[in-house]
Amino acid sequence: MKEKSKSLSCLVLSLGLLVLLVTGPAMAQDVLKIGVMYSMTGPLASVAKVQKSATELAVKDVNEAGGIQVGGKKLRLEAVFCDDHAKAETATALYEDLVKKQGVVAVIGGSLAHVPVALNAGAKKDPALIIATCAVPDEFFKQGVKAPTVLSMMGGASDIGRAGASYLAEKMKPKKIAFFLPAYAFGNALASGLESVMKKYPDVTYKIFWHPLGSSDMKRDLTAVRDYKPDVIAIGSWGNDCVNAFTQAFMMGLGKNSKLFSLWLVDSLAVAIPPEAMKGVVAQMFWYRDVTGVQDEALAKETNEFVSKYAKAYGEPPDPYGIPPYFAVKEIVRAAELAQSTDPIKMYEALMANPVWIGAKGEAKWRQDGRCMYKHTGFIVEGKGPAERKDGAFGSKYDFGKIVDAFPGEAFVPSLKELGY
């Protein structure tokens, strides 16, 4: 029964597997298979849906453009989608099945930080080119910890904490901050990053308040935050917890005496928060589709092209979490073509030898520790209320904010020396 359940967790994009079964081994040479692992059920389902859609779009684009040219052959890209149920042990079992039984040479994934950590452990025993598409702990990148064929599109979750705390301390200049964080790997990494920054500002008082993963009622936890009487409430909740935190904070009137700040926000969460609750919220985002005001022609060009392509396919604008999966697929293809091989080690080495690429976040570059560095690490977006929103091409619910600032390159990232390189 257990084996049956696991087999139902993975689905192959298109009719590729059926064709393979009918035509035999010769067809296998004409396919490059990648595993795609997201938390399609559970508290991260809304984020995972975006990640899956972006992956499907990338696979479609690659195949419609003629596939992958390797060793004089044209390969068709095939994706095997798996639901890790937000559990590391499930991710581990699925990874082993993908690599050992299904012939997968590369895997992208991660709606929660502990899934890429599990994939990294798996890659040490059974190598595949792994590209994590969510934020991960700093430990992930350390020399000797990171597997030799592993990369990360979003970098470390502690980077988010460092960047957010730096913006608060330097730009918003509060005297007292309450950090409201989820009690699991992502929240712990946020805390590590923000505390490394806050110790540089002894005049700013702060306290961390924790809540469990999957909290439908946060009133008790938020009451403790309110009683602390902070100038700023910085919320680091993720997935459905993020929506609940901002919605209930608004209902409790926490924004009347404290500025609300989101340490990490994406469209799929922002549109689920009532417009009244989003008004005036300051949010740190990996990417935002409207880069008006950011002086970067390459960024504007690539952003507009990706938004147009995604909107044509799905009838809605792309979420920031659609960027890593889409371009992770493109980088797997680039790796295979540069290496002229589907060997994971050769593919990884090819990317490291040719690290610069351009995507919807503008210029990007792979660093020695497997972290992708961007010209624009992140953006600060200010939330709009109902009266400020315009219908536009996607309706008023997607017009939830505007970019007011941007973070540069490696400003909030641990140095290679700190990570043992």
Image (cartoon, rainbow, N blue to C red):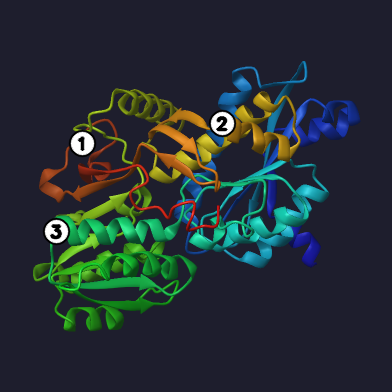
Tally of marks: 3
Query: Which residue matches tag 3?
Result: 172
Rendered residue at 17%/37% (across/down):
390
Marks 2, 1: nearer the viewer: 2
Rendered residue at 82%/50% (across/down):
100
Marks 3, 2: nearer the viewer: 3
Q: Tell me the number on the disc at residue 391.
A: 1
Mark 3 or mark 2, earlier in chain: 3
Q: Is residue 339 above or below residue 43?
A: above
Which image quarter holds the N terminus?
bottom right
At mark 1, the secondary structure is loop
Instruction: Answer whether labels 2 and 1 touch (C-beta < 8 Å).
Output: no
At mark 2, the secondary structure is helix
- Local crowd at mark 3 within 10 Å, few (<14), some, or many (≥20)? few
Query: Along the line of sight, which residue is nearer the eye, 140 or 75?
Result: 140
At mark 3, the secondary structure is helix
Query: Which residue matches tag 2?
Result: 330
Q: CA distance from mark 2 to mark 1?
A: 32 Å
Q: CA distance from mark 3 to mark 2?
A: 38 Å
Query: Along the line of sight, which residue is nearer the eye, 23 or 231?
Result: 231
- Local crowd at mark 1 within 10 Å, few (<14), some, or many (≥20)? few
Q: Is residue 294 above or below residue 373?
A: above
Q: Is residue 92 visible?
A: yes
Marks 1, 3: nearer the viewer: 3
Rendered residue at 65%/56% (across/down):
120
Amino acid type of the residue that numbered disc 3 sits on in the rendered structure: Met
x then y, percent, for residue 383: 19, 51
